[in-house]
Image (spheres, grey):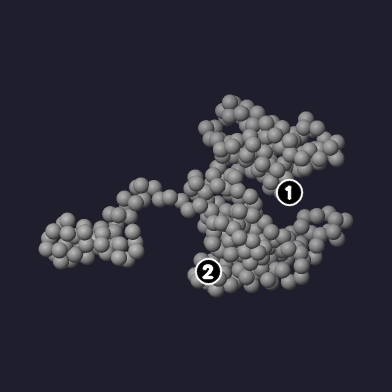
Amino acid sequence: MDGNTTAMAHRFARLLLQTLSDDAEFSSDLDSYGWRLDDFELKEERGFNHYRCALVCYTPLRVALFRVLWNELSSLHVISSGKRSPAISDALRRLCPVHFVTRADSALDFDRPGDWDRLVKLSEACREGQLLGRRMSSTLILQDEQTAGKTYYLGSLKSAAFLRIYDKTREQRAKAPKHLRAGIPDDWTRAEVVARPTDKERRLYLAHCSPCDVWGASPVTQEIYKAVEGGELGLMPKVAPRTEDFNRAYWTMLQQYKKTYEWLLKQCGGDVGLLGDRIYSDLLSAGLL
């Protein structure tokens, strides 16, 4: 493995940790626990997915704070989750003003009786096209045999954005020590949007938006957010088609409407200039220009 990349990952992790210490809430945690930055361990571990290497930053309580992943010639990839992930995101923005986010999960928590049924019913209305006028592609309910927990998915799991609703109470009680389980709410339901754009424009947008803005990843998740939070969100910016996409679409259109163009040219007496004027006039009349 390239030693230069490994050394760069270590330097970056230290810089990120130092930048994170400037966050008021994180600094308060350091003071309350009596921790110093030297108490945090950077441990090299085996990577996952297509990354071969990982550097994990552990707190003194052995909780993973963030992970840095890389290959020999790749850029660094940072992963964080949990309550400190917003602070880590802010630190990344200060440390690297220009970076891309390949995946962002944003959650809303509910703890009243009936919240699970309310959220699923709202999602079913989206799935059936009652809110947006078109049906969703897929819905899946899973039952965890070990915890008896349940998860509801709205949208294709392979798409750039989908919604996940799950029983957070059972998930947390299955993980927590027995003496802590009583403190977990009985009706804890989490609704979570998963945004995974494939284009640079939206990945750059994710790098600078707020957690609630992530709910604008699709029209469906936007409507869900508006229904449960009452807030207005803008959709993520649309990706401008590339020039080659326009060229491909243009030649496809010519092939599909070849006979129509032949008929129009005959109507214009074979005059190509007159044909162009006719098409331009019709586009104006139809309000397409």
Callout in the foreground (2, 1): 2
- 133 over 238 or under it: above or below: below
Closer to the camera in the image, 267 or 167: 267
Identity of the residue drawn at 40% across and 50% down: 241
Identity of the residue drawn at 72% across and 45% down: 84
Residue 266 x %, y %: 14, 64
Residue 105 x %, y %: 63, 53
| CA distance for labels 2 and 1 | 33 Å
Q: Would you name the residue on which mark 2 appears?
A: 132
Residue 114 x %, y %: 73, 71
Crowd around label 2: few <14 · some 14–19 · many ≥20 (10 Å)? some
The quadrant in which residue 2 appears is top right
Crowd around label 1: few <14 · some 14–19 · many ≥20 (10 Å)? few
Instruction: Name the side, left or right, on which 198 lies relative to 174.
Output: left
Identity of the residue drawn at 70% across and 34% down: 19
Residue 255 x %, y %: 25, 59
Q: What residue type is labelled 2?
A: Leu
SS for callout 2: loop
Q: Would you name the residue on which mark 1 appears?
A: 83
- 167 over 85 or under it: above or below: below
Quarter of the rendering occupied by the N terminus: top right
Which tag, 2 or 1, sits closer to the chain's start?
1
Q: What residue type is labelled 1?
A: Lys
- 6 over 228 or under it: above or below: above
State the count of labels: 2
Identity of the residue drawn at 77% across and 32% down: 37
Closer to the camera in the image, 14 or 202: 202
